[in-house]
Image (cartoon, rainbow, N blue to C red):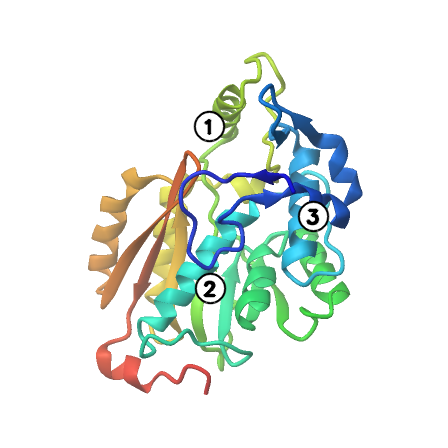
Amino acid sequence: MHLMKIKETLHERNKHRSGYDLDHLIKAVPGLKAYIKETPTGKKSLDWADPDAVFLLNKAILLSYYKLDNWSIPKGFLCPPVPGRADYIHYLADLLASVNEDKIPQGKSIRVLDLGVGANCIFPIIGVAEYGWKFVGADINSAALKSAKGIAAFNKSLQKNVEIRLQKDAGSYLHNIIRPNDFFDALVCNPPFYKDQEEANKHAMRKLNNLGKRSGQSKVLNFGGETHELIAEKGELGFVSGLIEESAQFPTRVFWYTTLVSSGKYLSQLYKLLKDKKVYDYQTIEMKQGNKSSRILAWTFLRPKEQKKWNFGG
């Protein structure tokens, strides 16, 4: 057994806390073997700078651990690291438990809205496999939605648990997606992190340098990503601020609004906006995987009486 260790601490329920069993993953996707290299110390590792290697690793993980029969995405679309996205789902489960007598609500009666489901459909895959939740995945990109819909259709575990909706208005977050009779226990979101292509390219070069690649190499993001997945006109701060603004128009339709926030420098501005919008409670959940730190920003408009009336699993 060859374990490729993931540094630092993942969530206690994260299947990948002990690292990747590469031999096991290669059995699931034999093509992964070509991208496994031996280090000078004799350990096996992946060529993390190669987008094809990252894609095959993700595919092997999803087929091996998350009840999938098949998984693929169109070339160039975002291929996010599974352990980090799994951490998000597990911390979300803890957040729901905190308002449900410390019991994680499970099963199909729990509804989660994935804002920006993308071509990979990663949050629904993990949420269905780990907790049996139902998901509505929304996106503005029709090609991404076609891919996500295909993943849901071709995997038995997802077929009746994932619904896909197109956001026709690029300027809206929740309008046209939350329907008159919709109520969601939570919303999840992986927002675009960059304000323009130049910022994305700088990030790509930093990653390549950290991986020991030459600075003259092509500015290819190893996790891929189409423009709409990576770039928002006002960057991450503008995108998340817009979501907070619009969430105030649907205060009782979602219990917990949550989103990833990659840069901690924006938190003070986001906290101020949350207070301006008179949310009842907000929290920041710190996450760490290897050298990368991230966090989940969560907020709710529901007051104690409204929270008590909320029927998880009902």
- Give the foreground label among 2 and 3: 3
Cα–Cα gap, marks 1 and 2: 27 Å
Judging from the image, what secondary structure is the residue with disc 1 in?
A: helix
> Looking at the picture, does residue 183 appear above or below residue 233?
below
> Looking at the picture, does residue 245 appear above or below residue 225?
below
> Looking at the picture, does residue 52 appear above or below residue 115?
above
Q: Say which residue appears at 68% left-offset and 38% top-offset.
A: 76
**Amino acid found under the numbered disc labelled 2:** Leu
Foreground pick, 242 / 27: 27
Judging from the image, what secondary structure is the residue with disc 3 in?
A: helix
Residue 199 tag number? 1
Foreground pick, 304 / 276: 304
Can you give x and y, in whole percent of width and height, for residue 300 in the image? 30, 67
Cα–Cα gap, marks 1 and 3: 37 Å
Disc 3 crowd rating (10 Å Cα; few below 14, some 14-19, many 20+) is some
Q: Quadrant of the C terminus?
A: bottom left
Q: Earlier in the sequence, mark 1 or mark 3?
A: 3
Q: Quadrant of the N terminus?
A: top right
Q: CB atoms at circles 2 and 3 under 8 Å apart?
A: no
**Amino acid found under the numbered disc labelled 1:** Glu
- Give the foreground label among 1 and 3: 3
Residue 174 tag number? 2
Q: Which residue is mark 3?
A: 24
Judging from the image, what secondary structure is the residue with disc 2 in?
A: loop
Residue 279 in view in this figure: no
Q: Say which residue appears at 22% left-offset and 45% top-offset.
A: 268
Cα–Cα gap, marks 2 and 3: 41 Å
